[in-house]
Image (spheres, helix red, strand yellow):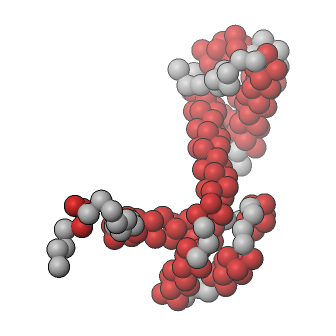
Amino acid sequence: MNRNYTHDSEHDYGPTRTQQRRDALAVLALANQLVELPASKLARLELPEDVLREIANTRRITAHIARKRQLQFLAKVMRRHDTEVFDGVRAALGENRERQRQETAAMHRMEATRERLLTDTDAVMGELIERYPNIDRQHLRSLVRQAKAEKDANKPPRAYREIYQLLKELASGAADTAADAGEPEGSEITED
């Protein structure tokens, strides 16, 4: 028997073993993501009943090897369904991941701006005033002074946190204004 099947164009042999393994590992990764999702987000996804039941079973197991085995069983249950069943789930998870990445990047930019504000107050205040003309300058300067005093006195960082909240409100207000004007959302607080 000839083991080289590629010459027979009449017969479809299906996916290769390597492709089958890649597909199985992708389903296992998706199963792991579903198990790690908070219950509130999981409830919003449209999943088959047997998959939801196995996710609940996997979450109850705490022993490492047993959980790993149960996770593999969950992936097996998921492979019994058509791949189209999970297309919406994959899209929702990918969308969530991109949104989380953007939110994390915005948070880091605001934290960097706050740090720069505490070290180079006048320059950063000028940037913020230019970017946000309606900013309450006195309040922000007061918060900066309080944050510096708290840091020097080794007190809880109440004003430090308030600065972050103020920057967050400014950025969200600017994003809302940009969205209303039809501009791209790139006009948030950035580190220069």
Q: Where is residue 89 shown, x and y percent of the image? A: 66, 58
Taking the spot 67% from the left edge, 21% from the top edge, the residue there is 184
> At which x and y percent is residue 62?
59, 85
Left or right: 11 as drawn, with respect to 39: left
Q: Is residue 69 above or below residue 111?
A: below
Query: Quadrant of the rendered structure where residue 37 is?
Result: bottom right
| Location of the N terminus (image quadrant) | bottom left
Q: Residue at x 22, y 61 (%)?
A: 7
Instruction: Using residue 180 as the reference point, say whether residue 50 is left or right of it.
Output: left
Q: Nearer the viewer, residue 62 or 145?
A: 62
Above/below status of 159 relative to 76: above
Name the residue at 76% across, 43% down: 158
Q: Residue furthest front?
A: 10
Instruction: Give x and y (percent) for residue 189.
Output: 65, 25
- The total number of labels drawn is 0
Depth check, front residue: 162 or 119: 162
- Using the rendered image of the protein, determine whether residue 152 is visible from the camera's viewpoint: no
| Residue 177: % across, % down | 80, 20
Residue in the foreground of this view, choosing between 89 and 71: 89
Q: Residue at x 62, y 19 (%)?
A: 124
Q: Can you say whether 146 is above or below 180 in the image?
A: below
94 in relation to 107, above or below: below
Q: Is residue 90 left or right of residue 39?
A: left
The quarter holding residue 57 reads bottom right
Residue 110 visible in the picture:
yes
